[in-house]
């Protein structure tokens, strides 16, 4: 059976492709630097200069300054006039704060979603498949995104929009820490897959208590990360 969208595609003539407008220069710099910081291409302690970034993205220095100011406000960089921007390290305190906040939100959410709806279970299964694919390809940054999406799906399904918004504020820190954990602990990828499979199994069984315990153990493992540049 074809969907309405698929049917329209088959019966209506294709419209000419319209070129998307190029993103503003400052936005391109912002996205370039943010991605590189989150996937550790630019590791903590790296000094970035306006000239190098302007050349890398193909823009002037003015939009670079604008982008760096925005990234500093997000806590990813520290600006030093006439020197550049230093990529901040992940501190032990930041790790502890993120873990504590995640536990407060995620343990509550995983209990609340039981009995889990079929749509959530299917979504989690799909994200597990994506994680396995990313792991097989050696894509740690992509694995971290899918890993984080697994947890976010449970939080979203709990239906508390205020908690969901709070959780979304942790996104960048989670992604950066996730990649750092996998670099620090080579077996973390396989363990994460095993733990996610266990959480999904408990949700399928309708066992909220066990699921909450599994989430606590899984999230708490991030504390083993040793802060490093």
Image (tube, rainbow, N blue to C red):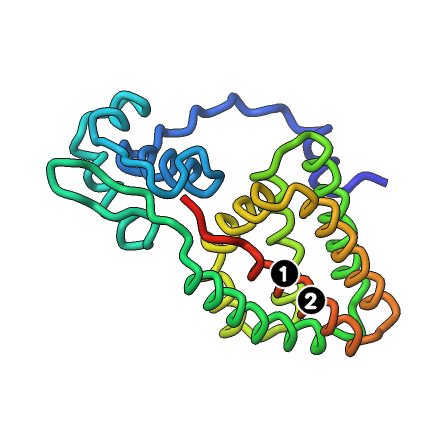
Q: Secondary structure at mark 2?
A: helix
C-alpha gap between disc 1 and disc 2: 6 Å
Q: In this view of the protein, which residue sits in the foreground, 66 or 106?
A: 106
Q: Quadrant of the C terminus?
A: top left
Q: Position of residue 84 (x, y in %)?
A: 20, 37
Residue 187, quarter of picture: top right
| Residue 217: image tag | 2
Q: Most extreme residue toward the left, as rendered?
A: 82
Circle 1 packing at 10 Å, graded few (<14), some (14-19), many (20+), is few
**172 shown above or below 63:** below
| Residue 64: image tag | none
Q: Position of residue 223 (x, y in %)?
A: 56, 61
Query: Which residue: 55% across, 44% down?
Result: 179
Circle 2 packing at 10 Å, graded few (<14), some (14-19), many (20+), is few
Asked whether disc 1 touches disc 2, contact meaning CB atoms under 8 Å apart, the reply is yes
Residue 221 lies left or right of residue 57; in this view the side is: right
Residue 51, quarter of picture: top left
Query: Which residue: 30% across, 47% down?
Result: 77
Query: How many dots with numbers?
Result: 2
Residue 229 lies left or right of residue 136; in this view the side is: left
Query: Which residue: 21% across, 35% down?
Result: 63
**159 shown above or below 183:** below
Residue 60 lies left or right of residue 8; in this view the side is: left
Q: In this view of the protein, which residue sits in the foreground, 159 or 21?
A: 159
User: In this figure, which residue is indicated by the disc labeled 1?
Assistant: 221
Q: Position of residue 136 (x, y in %)?
A: 73, 33
Q: Secondary structure at mark 1?
A: helix
Query: Which residue: 77% across, 75% down?
Result: 114
Q: Quadrant of the N terminus?
A: top right
Q: In this view of the protein, which residue sits in the foreground, 2 or 58?
A: 58
Q: Position of residue 194 (x, y in %)?
A: 78, 53
**62 shown above or below 4:** above
């Amino acid at each position: 059976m074809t969907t309405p969208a698929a049917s329209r595609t088959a019966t209506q003539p294709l419209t000419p492709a319209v070129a998307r407008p190029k993103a503003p220069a400052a936005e391109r710099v912002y996205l370039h630097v943010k991605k590189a910081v989150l996937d550790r291409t630019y590791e903590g302690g790296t000094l970035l200069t306006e000239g190098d970034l302007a050349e890398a993205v193909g823009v002037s220095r003015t939009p670079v300054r604008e982008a760096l100011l925005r990234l500093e406000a997000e806590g990813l960089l520290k600006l030093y006039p006439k020197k550049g921007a230093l990529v901040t390290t992940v501190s032990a305190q930041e790790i502890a704060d993120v873990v504590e906040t995640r536990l407060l939100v995620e343990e509550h959410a995983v209990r609340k979603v039981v009995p889990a709806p079929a749509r959530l279970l299917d979504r989690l299964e799909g994200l597990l498949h994506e994680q396995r694919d990313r792991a097989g390809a050696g894509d740690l940054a992509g694995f971290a995104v899918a890993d984080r999406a697994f947890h976010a799906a449970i939080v979203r399904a709990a239906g508390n929009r205020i908690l969901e918004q709070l959780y979304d504020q942790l996104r960048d820190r989670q992604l950066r820490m996730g990649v750092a954990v996998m670099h620090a602990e080579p077996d973390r990828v396989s363990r994460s897959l095993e733990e996610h499979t266990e959480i999904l199994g408990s949700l399928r069984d309708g066992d909220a208590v066990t699921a909450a315990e599994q989430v606590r153990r899984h999230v708490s493992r991030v504390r083993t990360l040793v802060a490093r540049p």
